[in-house]
Each structure stands twice: as structure tokens, then as C-alpha cells.
Image (cartoon, coloured by chain):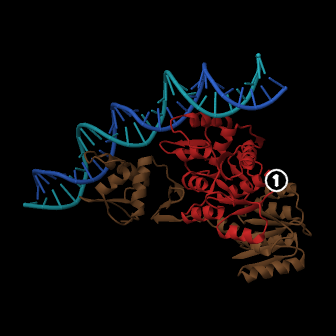
Chain colours: A red, B brown, C cyan, D blue
DNA sequence: CGATCCGTTCAGGCTGAGTTAAGCTCAGCC
DNA sequence: GGCTGAGCTTAACTCAGCCTGAACGGATCG
């Protein structure tokens, strides 16, 4: 899962990013509105966290620009102001959620997970695919009920796949979602990760579609 | 837009309902957990507002029951408690948003709108042609409902054809669309691809127009 | 400082998608 | 009817794309 964090306060941004990475998120940080707008418009993210008070380009303008270009990207707005009129403005600009500072990082994480789950079209907190289940709020995978031990990258890949199970996930897009910054295409590390995943959850579950990407299915049947 | 409001405090429920109706929402009120659960399970709502402290059946239980029966209904939880651990529990049960009392009705309305907007984005626009269907967002072809297994080139050809079904697709133009760069006309590889496609979806569906190109039709003679 | 774990790189091997080529079919035309 | 050429089909070939085992190096932790 890849998050775009647009926040000019470097200290706060670092703290949030560290907390998110501890939860296996991939995080890109933009320090001002322009950079944030550009990244959100060109890269593939699952969700964006957007501060309202930004240099160069204010948060609402960034959000409006994304919506104007038809980005479906879910956006959580972050702000120091607690006034309800501000919130209304945020939602009017197309925000999906709103959090006021100060806040618990745990709550931010929960809200982000809920946003991603919902925007992937899943209502229930648990997504199942054959013997494999994913509990969205906690981020835990289980195989036949037993919790799986996955590394950060394995987790990101599997999470991306299960959110779009039964659909082919494009190779390039998958790499974009799994790796922070720009993904180099001249590497087979993703294949190695997939191979290791297959050894853990069974070879049949991750199907490879030549020339396009991977697909998570219930295995057989 | 229809809202299910599960709230035992009649005064508060009335206030919320009035505010929502002022915004042209249709509101059903349930005064206890059992009624709320039943309504949410049998009626069609766009979104539900769920109080946590309810008589007869507590809020989290209601939510879990909905999720268990596969309801895709987006749910906003309403509670008097402000602890972040409570919020985490709410999200774990499958909530999509969380609001603590007291709150501005304007914020509730905004959050409900955001929830509905996001959960509405999952209607699948499908192109159909006889027994063949194409789901544009996922890019999946299906024949009589069964997903088709296509190679990259087969997929490109079929996609080009179904986007202009019932119209003759010029050979040269088809090759230009399917092959990167400039297509050499001195090859019959396209014909091979078409032949393989025909074997998969039935010979009648792709009609040959001599001297011009191909045409995708419903297939009946 | 050593141990462990994780992500990456590299090399070797395999599979199958896409192409080529050759022979066949059939529509259109005289 | 017979000729002609566009299009169809099958089989074989080739190489890009993918898999995987092993080894390397960086990070983290005691």
C-alpha cells in the first residue's frame, strides 16, 4: 500500500511516515503543494494525506486540481484548525475524510485503512480469497486461519493483489504501488518477492499472466 | 439518497433526521439495535448512521452482523466516547467513518456525502455483444459469464473490436492499434491471432469483410 | 561485534506467446 | 466450370518474459 503524504512540517511528516512504514505502508513525502499535486497526478497511490496549510499551493487547490483531472484517489485532509466550516469546505473540495491536529497516529492509520478498503470496493473488514484472508483494520493475513508471517515487501504485494483479487494487476503498476519513489523497471526483485510469497501461500494462488502481470485467485475451481 | 439512522435518543435522532431531510435525504429511524439490524438487512440504504450505545443490541454487534451477511452498506459510527481505542474497535468491526458527540450536523452531512460518493464508484459499466461481455474497468472479457483467458495480443484485438462492435474495423487500422510502432503489412500474424480468438469465442462472432477488415457481431446467423 | 533477517542482484533454465511459412479453402469473377 | 488471390489454419520455431536457487550487502538488534 502506497501513501502520498503532503505535509510541509518536516518533523511531523517524518513522524507520520515512520509510523506508517512500521505498518508496512510505502510512503512518498511531498513538502509543498506543487510537488504534492504533481506526484498525486502522475504516480499511483492508494490514498493521500493532505495538509491544508501548504507553501506554494494551498491544500484545497491541490485537491480541487486532482478532482478536476478525474483522479479517483481517496484523500484524507489534515489540519490544525478545528472549525466546522473549514471541514465543510474540505469535503466540498472532494475530500473523503478529515482529521484535526493533534491526533493519534493510530487513528490516522485506521482511517486510511478504512478509506483504502472502501475505495477498493470492499465493505467487510475481512477480505477472503480461498484459504487466504486479510483483515483490513489490523492488516493481518491468515492462511487457513493461521496468521502469516510476511516481510514488509511481501505484505505490500499481497495486499495490493487481494484488494483487486481475480483481476490482473499490471506489473508496472504493482511495482509503483510497492516501491517508494520511482520504481526502476530494470530489476527482477518483484519476481523474487512473488516467488517467496508463493512458497508461503501456495503456488496456485498467484497466477502469472504473461506480458501483463499477476492475479490473485482462490487457487483452483 | 436514503439514510438509516440507528439512534435511541429520540431527541437527538429527531434533530439529525430533520437536518438530513432539510438536505433532501430520505431518513428511516430505528430506536434500538434489533430494529436497526433488521432494517439494514432488509431495506436498501445508501448509508447508515449507527450509535454505539443502543438498547437490545449494541452498535458493534449490529455492524458485525451486517458485515457477516455481506452488506456493502457504508456505516458511520456515532458515539459519546472520544477514546482512540474505541475508534480503533469501531474500525475493526468494519466502520467506514467515526464521529464523536457533540458534533455539528453539517459535518455529519458532509461525511455522509463523502461516504456515499466513494462507495458509489463501483458500478461496472459493461459492453456486451451477444454472449460476450467486456468489463471496462477491470479489462476482463467473459463468455456466457465465464472469464476468458486471453493473451496480450488477443486481448488488444478483441478490445479494439468490441469498442466498435457492429462496425467494420479496417485491417490496417487494426494492426496499427494492436502493434506498437509501425506495423509491417507483410505478415499474417494478425490473421493467426484472429483465428485463435475465433477458436476461443466462437467462429461466428468475428466476421470477415473481404478486402476491408473485421467486424464483431452478436454472432447469430 | 556477531547474528539474523531482508531486499536485491545474478545466472541458468524453462515456458509459452508471437511470428513465420506452407498448404488449404473459398469467394468473386470471367 | 475453372482461375485467382485474399484469407484461414496448422505446425514448427524463436526468443522475450518469467522462475528460482544462491550469494551478496545493508540494516537492525542483542
Residue B181 placement (x, y as % from top left): 34, 47
Q: Residue at x 50, y 45 (%)?
A: A212
> Local crowd at mark 1 within 10 Å, few (<14), some, or many (≥20)?
few
For disc 1, the marked residue is A104
Q: Left or right: B203 with respect to A103?
A: left
**As drawn, C20 above or below B17:** above
Q: Residue at x 58, y 34 (%)?
A: A189
Residue A2 placement (x, y as % from top left): 64, 48
**As drawn, B31 above or below A116:** below
Q: Could you tell me which chain the residue with mark 1 belongs to?
A: A
Return the residue found at the far front: A56
Q: Looking at the rendering, which quadrant does residue B47 occupy?
A: bottom right
Q: Nearer the viewer, residue B200 or A76?
A: A76
Q: Left or right: D20 with respect to B197?
A: right
Residue A117 placement (x, y as % from top left): 69, 56
Q: Left or right: A59 with respect to D12?
A: right
Q: Looking at the rendering, which quadrant does residue B64 occupy?
A: bottom right
Q: Residue at x 33, y 53 (%)?
A: B176
**As drawn, B166 above or below D1:** below
Return the residue found at the far right: B55
Q: Left or right: B75 with respect to A203?
A: right
| Residue B65 in view (yes/no) | yes
Q: Secondary structure at mark 1?
A: loop
Q: Nearer the viewer, residue A170 or B18?
A: B18
Q: Nearer the viewer, residue B204 or B154?
A: B154
Q: Looking at the rendering, which quadrant does residue C9 occupy?
A: top right
Q: Nearer the viewer, residue A35 or A16?
A: A35
Residue A132 placement (x, y as % from top left): 70, 45
Amino acid at each position: 500500500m502506497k501513501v502520498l503524504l503532503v505535509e510541509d512540517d518536516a518533523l511531523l511528516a517524518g513522524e507520520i511516515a515512520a509510523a506508517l512504514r512500521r505498518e508496512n505502508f510505502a510512503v512518498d513525502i511531498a513538502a509543498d503543494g506543487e510537488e504534492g499535486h504533481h506526484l498525486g497526478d502522475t504516480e499511483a497511490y492508494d490514498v493521500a494525506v493532505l495538509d491544508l496549510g501548504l507553501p506554494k499551493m494551498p491544500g484545497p487547490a491541490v485537491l480541487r486540481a486532482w478532482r478536476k483531472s478525474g483522479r479517483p484517489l481517496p484523500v484524507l485532509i489534515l489540519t490544525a484548525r478545528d472549525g466546522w466550516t473549514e471541514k465543510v469546505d474540505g469535503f466540498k473540495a472532494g475530500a473523503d475524510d478529515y482529521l484535526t491536529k493533534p491526533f493519534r497516529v493510530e487513528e490516522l492509520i485506521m482511517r486510511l485503512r478504512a478509506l483504502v478498503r472502501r475505495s477498493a470496493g470492499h465493505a467487510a473488514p475481512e477480505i477472503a480469497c480461498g484459504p487466504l484472508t486479510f483483515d483490513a483494520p489490523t492488516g493481518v493475513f491468515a492462511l487457513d486461519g493461521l496468521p502469516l508471517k510476511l516481510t514488509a515487501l511481501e505484505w505490500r504485494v499481497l495486499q495490493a493483489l487481494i484488494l483487486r483479487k481475480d483481476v490482473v494487476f499490471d506489473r508496472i503498476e504493482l511495482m509503483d504501488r510497492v516501491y517508494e519513489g520511482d520504481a526502476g523497471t530494470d530489476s527482477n526483485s518483484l519476481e523474487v518477492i512473488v516467488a517467496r510469497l508463493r512458497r508461503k501461500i501456495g503456488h496456485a494462488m498467484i497466477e502469472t499472466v504473461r506480458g501483463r502481470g499477476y492475479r490473485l485467485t482462490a487457487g483452483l475451481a
